[in-house]
Image (cartoon, rainbow, N blue to C red):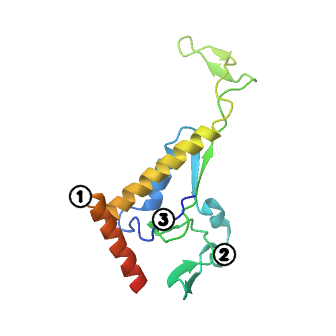
Amino acid sequence: VARGVPVGLGSHTGWDTRLDGRLAQAVMCVNAVKAVEIGKGVRIAYTRGSQAHDEIAYDNQQRRFYHLTNRAGGVEGGITNGEEVRIVGYLKPIATLKKALRSVDMVTKEPFLAQYERSDTCTVPAAGVIGESMVALVLATAFLEKFGGDSVEETTRNYNAYLEQLRAY
């Protein structure tokens, strides 16, 4: 979960600039990840449209738009919508098995049972750290693409001007 991500990062215009695609690729590149879900992901396919889409509301005190739910996971149409960005990477089980699986010798092409070799006992902690890092990298890149400049001061100025523009809206 990435909190505090500004609205408007990413793009809807190109397959390679859609933020959800870039995030999914980054998480999918983590070793042992076999599936990625943004928001409710696959579960949305089994619901009605009224249960899949997020309703929009307006907060007069904070002077901002927000969603009543976050089924989209903070990204709609390839662009962040101001809600938490929610991503899950699903890992395959570790390769270490006490019950030998059948295999084939690459040289002799004869069948044999794979030997037990102790390896990782759990990949989740390491994969979680790497996944968070990959998501942070993609979000930072998208932030700099939108607000970046030649210095931190220029990037900060661009971002603050954008926030002022949103408040004026």
Marks 2/3: CA–CA distance: 24 Å
Residue type for callout 3 = Val
Residue 154, horizontal then vertical, whole percent: 27, 64
For disc 2, the marked residue is 51
Marks 1/3: CA–CA distance: 22 Å
For disc 1, the marked residue is 150
Nearer-the-camera pick, 158 or 131: 158
Q: Residues within 10 Å of mark 1 (few under 14, many from 20)?
A: few
Could you tell me which secondary element the residue under label 2 belongs to? Answer: helix
Residue 140, horizontal then vertical, whole percent: 40, 56
Nearer-the-camera pick, 129 or 30: 129
Could you tell me which secondary element the residue under label 3 belongs to? Answer: loop
Disc on the earlier residue, 1 or 3: 3
Q: Is residue 149 left or right of residue 59?
A: left
Q: Is residue 91 left or right of residue 20?
A: right
Instruction: Give yes or no for contact between labels 1 and 3 (Cβ–Cβ under 8 Å).
Output: no
Nearer-the-camera pick, 82 or 29: 82
Disc on the earlier residue, 1 or 2: 2
